[in-house]
Image (cartoon, grey):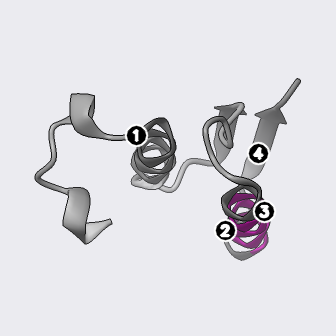
Amino acid sequence: MEEILTTPVRKLSLGQRMKCELIASLLHTPKVLFLDEPTLGLDVVAQQNMRDFIKDYNREFGSTIILTSH
């Protein structure tokens, strides 16, 4: 993510924005996290990586994570 820190948001792809939003939502280690289609705009491999990350985060921090998808 370091390489996109100085990139204006309007120039980021949808997938990059989704990753940044997930990072921003985890900054304060929330006890409950609501994620509305967090894998939107990601390719299949990136979607699986994000889901794996969310599972690992849940196990490590014990956060309640509510994830919506269609």
Q: Residues within 10 Å of mark 4 (few under 14, many from 20)?
A: some
The residue positioned 70% from the left and 67% from the top of the image is 49
The residue where tag 4 is placed is 65
Gap between marks 2 and 4 measured at Cα: 11 Å
Check disc 3 and give the amino acid type: Gln
The residue where tag 2 is placed is 61
SS at mark 1 in the image? loop
First-in-chain label (3 vs 4):
3
Tag in front: 3 or 4: 3
Q: Residues within 10 Å of mark 1 (few under 14, many from 20)?
A: few
Q: Is residue 1 left or right of residue 29?
A: left
Residue 40: % across, % down: 66, 35
The residue positioned 40% from the left and 54% from the top of the image is 27
Residue 33: % across, % down: 65, 40
Tag in front: 2 or 3: 3
The magenta span reads 48-59
Badge 1 vs badge 3, beta-carbon distance below 8 Å: no
Residue 11: % across, % down: 24, 36
Which one is nearer the viewer's eye here, 45 or 28? 45
Residue 62: % across, % down: 75, 63
Residue 48 is tagged as 3
The residue positioned 22% from the left and 67% from the top of the image is 3
